Amino acid sequence: MKTKFIIGPLSNGNVSLLTNMAKYAGLPWDLVLSAEVFGHYKPDRETYLGAAKILGLAPAEVMLVAAHNNDLAAAQSFGLKTAFVPRVTEYGPHQVRDFEPDGNWDFVAEDFNDLASQLGC
């Protein structure tokens, strides 16, 4: 995917946290987008539209890939493309939501390899 698309998190975590995560985990992000930069947190529209703006792209040219249906619903409502990739152990044994997609997302994938395949990578 990295050869075809810009890859970067859009997180409510701060820039320092995300930068350290990328550095120490060897994540291949092209950039880090934090809600901290926009002065708003997801699901505020300023966060999603700010990500598109900072990349010089229209919202429809940006895709949010997430395991959280509510995050995808917000992104979609502001014109972004969406992809659901589940993380069924994110909350440990007490997880009760986000096992399955519950919206009309542009892509639904089993994992990132499946998403890459669907995107023609």
Image (tube, grey):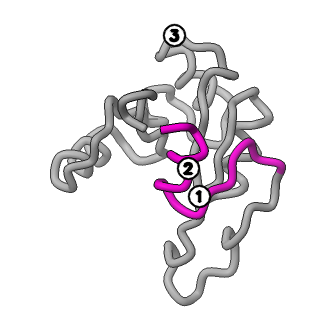
Sequence-wise, which precedes: disc 2 or disc 3? 3
Residue indicated by mark 2 = 115
Sequence-wise, which precedes: disc 3 or disc 1? 3
Tell me if mark 3 has few (under 14), some (14-19) or many (20+) residues whose alpha carbon lies within 10 angstroms of its own.
Answer: few
* Residue 5, picture quadrant: top left
Q: Nearer the viewer, mark 2 or mark 1?
A: 2
Please give the label number shown on residue 112: none
Instruction: Tell me residue 23's x, y (percent).
Output: 17, 46
- Using the numbered discs, state the Cα–Cα distance from disc 3 to disc 1 in whole angstroms: 25 Å
User: Left of 31 or right of it: where is 100?
Assistant: right
Instruction: Tell me residue 117's x, y (percent).
Output: 54, 47
Residue indicated by mark 1 = 85
Identify the amino acid type marked 2. Answer: Leu
Please give the label number shown on residue 56: 3
The image quadrant where one finds the N terminus is top left
Identify the amino acid type marked 1. Answer: Val
- At a point 50% along the width and 29% down the height, the residue shown is 39
The question of residue 113 being in magenta is answered with yes
Of 120 and 37, nearer the camera is 120
